[in-house]
Amino acid sequence: MAEGHELFMSRLWSIDDEQLARPSGLPGWSGRHLLSHIGHNARALGRLAHWAATGDPTPMYPSSSARAEEIDTGADWPLPRLREFVAEEQERLAAAFDLITGERWEAEVITAQGRIVPASIIPWLRARELWIHAYDLQLGGDFAFMPEDFLGALVEDVLTHRRTRQTIEVEVSGPPADLARWLTGRGASPRLHLAAGFELPKLPPWL
């Protein structure tokens, strides 16, 4: 998670304000929306960390519409504030983790998708957001800049989610970076291989 944050921030500081006003790698989102999401995601996961540390149920979002509303509101903030917001909320999240001790890491919390998970999963949820959106922030290339162990875990994680909603009846092989990029909905690579006569299936949104 810490490495993902460092990478995200390094990419963020290499991008000027004009670029952040343009569309990001996510349909319908500008760079501003992406920064707002990253900051508010840290805040939302901080609520789960508080839940785990104290036992006081604090959902990621107070309502089904709150996530989108937060992102849209934050996207209108001045860009200097948005840049600082990402860094500040990451620091607050890390501090919230410090308050989870011992067995409280096994305390159950509920994600925005309604999954019941142990608190020990929260850092992974944040790492996932940071590494993937670092790609969305600065488009180009593939996922090869991501650590190998992270890519393996990401592929397994996305497949687990997708298998609950879709039957994938074709075997796709290729480098982990290309598999992860395709499975997360960020395009296919010529390095992906299928059996003769098959085509890559169309995937619904991941999250």
Image: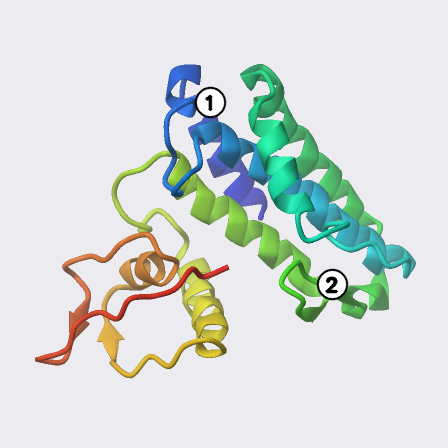
Percent x, y of residue 131: 47, 47
Amino acid at dot 2? Ala
Say if 171 sits above or below 125 in the image. below
Residue at the (73%, 51%) spot, across then down: 63
Neighbour class for label 1 at 10 Å: few (<14), some, many (≥20)? Answer: few
Residue that carries the numbered disc 2 in the rendered image:
119
Neighbour class for label 2 at 10 Å: few (<14), some, many (≥20)? Answer: many
Residue at the (31%, 37%) spot, across then down: 139
Q: Which secondary structure lies at badge 1?
A: helix
Say if 64 sits above or below 90 in the image. below
Residue that carries the numbered disc 1 in the rendered image:
13
Amino acid at dot 1? Trp
State which quadrant residue 199 falls in: bottom left
Percent x, y of residue 91: 70, 35
Q: Is residue 68 visible?
A: yes
Q: Is residue 100 visible?
A: no
